[in-house]
Image (cartoon, rainbow, N blue to C red):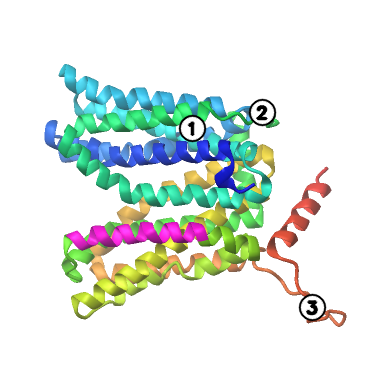
Amino acid sequence: MPLRKQRDYRLLWSARTISITGSEVSKLAIPLTAVTLLTASPLEMGILTAAAFVPALLFGLQSGAIADRLSRHRPLMIACELVAAATAASVPLAWFLGVLNTAWLIVAALIIGTAGVMFKAANFPHLAAVVATEQRTDAIAGFNASYSVASVCGPSLAGVLVQILTAPFAVLVEALAFLTSALLLRSIRTPEKTEPAPSRGMWRDVTEGLRASVTDPILRALLGAGITINFFAMAYTAVYMLYMLNTLDIPQLMIGVLIALGGAGGLLGAWATARLAKRYGENRVLLISVLFFPIEVLAVGLLDGPLWWKLSALALTGAVSGAIVVAFSTCLGAIIFRDTAPHLRGRVNATVTFATQGVMALGGVAGGLLAELLGLRPVIFICAAGIAMSTLWIWASPLRPKRPTGPDHDPHITLLTDRQEMDRLVAAKRGSSI
C-alpha cells in the first residue's frame, strides 16, 4: 500500500511537518521579541542564537544512547513535544504578566532545543515500527520534503503572525504546533516491538555508537561527507547575504524568492529520489547527487553580467541545489538505517547529527574570518572546492559498485543493483558476527 494511504505514516508525517513549521516560526519570532521588546544587547543576541546549537552539542550523543535503550520510542517523542509546547507557551504568558526578559528566552530556547534533540534521536529508530523496510526511503524523502517546505513557508508565516499578533504571541503558534504534533503522535496505533539494547553505562553506550560510526567503512564515509559538506556550506552561508547584496547587486526581495525556489527544488528532489532509489538503489543516487553539490556555490562565484542573467542562473542552480540536497539527505538517512544494526540506530544517527550539526558553528566562524582576510569572492570559491571534497569520501567508499573482473567474467551479465548487493554484504557481515 502506498505511504500516502497508510494512516499511521500520514499521522507521523503530519506531526513532523506541523512541528517543524512551528519551529521555523519561532526562529524569527523569538529573536524579534528579544530585539524589539526587550532591547537585547549584541552579546545577549549572540547567546540566544547559540542556544539553538548548544543542546545538540551537549546532549546529542547521549540522546542516541537513551533512544537505543527504549523498547517504545513514541512515549518519549510525545513527552518531548509536550515539554516544548509548555515552554513555548511560557513566552507569551511571561510577556502578558510583565516578567519576560532575555534570560527567559535563552532558557526557553535551551529547553526546546533539548526536547528537539531527544525527539530526533527517538524518531529515527521509531520509523521502523511505522514503515515497512522497502518503503523507508520514500518515508525519509517525505520528511525531507517537509523540511524544505517549512524552511520556506515558516519565515513568511512568522512575518505575518508577528504583524498580526506581535512577536511574543507569535511564539504561541509554535506551542500549538508542538501540542498538535503530540496529539497526532498519540493517535498512531501501530505497536512498537523494538528490542532494547543492553546498557553498559552511558559512556560505554556512547562510545559504542561512535565506534560503529567510524569503523564501518560506509558509515565512516557518510559521516565524513556530511561533516565536509556542512562545514563549507555554513562558511558559504556566512558570506552569502553580503555577497548577493554587495557584489552581485541582487535586490533584497529577490533573495527571498531565490530561497523559496530552493525549497521548491527540494520538493522535486523528494519526489524524484523516491522513484530513482527504487530503480537504481540508494547508493547510485547518492553517488551521483554528491557530484552536483558544488554547482550552485561555484555558479554564484563565477556569476557576472546583467541582472536578468544573474537572476535566471541563480534561480536554476538554486532549484537544482534544493533537489540535490534532499536527494543526498534522503539516501544518506536510508543507507544509515539499512547498514546499521537495529540496536545501534539511535546512537549512530545521533553521532552523525552531533558531528554534522556541531561543525556548522565552526564553519560559520571560518567563513567570516576568511572573508575578512581574503574578501567575499575567494571564500565562495574555497567553499565550492571544499564541498567538492565530499565526493572523495563517497566515491572512495564501498558505496561505489565494483565490477567483477577475471577471465570468467562475462561483461554482458547484468550487475546486481546496489540494494541487492548491499543487502547481501550486510547479511554476510551480520551472519559472521553471530
Work out whether 212 lies above or below 58. below
Could you say which quadrant of the image residue 419 lies in?
A: bottom right
Q: Amino acid at mark 2?
A: Arg
Q: Is residue 100 visible?
A: yes
Q: Residues within 10 Å of mark 1 (few under 14, many from 20)?
A: many
> Where does label 3 land, which residue?
405
- Lower sequence index among marks 3 and 1: 1
Disc 3 + disc 2, Cβ < 8 Å: no
Residue 427 drawn at (x, y percent): 78, 51
Secondary structure of the magenta portion, mostly? helix
Camera-near label (2 vs 1) is: 1
- Extreme-top residue of the structure: 97
- Label 2 CA crowd tier, 10 Å (few <14, some 14–19, many 20+): few
Please report whichever mark, 2 or 1, sits nearer to the chain's N-terminal start. Answer: 1
Q: Is residue 73 above or below residue 134?
A: above
Say what secondary structure mark 3 lies in: loop
- Is disc 3 surrounded by few (<14), some (14 to 19) or many (20+) residues within 10 Å? few
Q: Is residue 265 magenta?
A: yes
| Res 115 quadrant in image | top left
Please name the residue shown 40% across and 57% down the image. Answer: 231
Question: Which of label 3 and label 2 is nearer to you?
Answer: 3
Label 2: which residue? 200
Quadrant in which the C terminus appears: top right
- Residue 223 makes an appearance in the image: no
Q: Which residues are magenta?
A: 253-271
Residue that label 1 marks: 118
Q: Could you say where residue 360 lies in the image, as x and y percent from the top left?
A: 39, 51
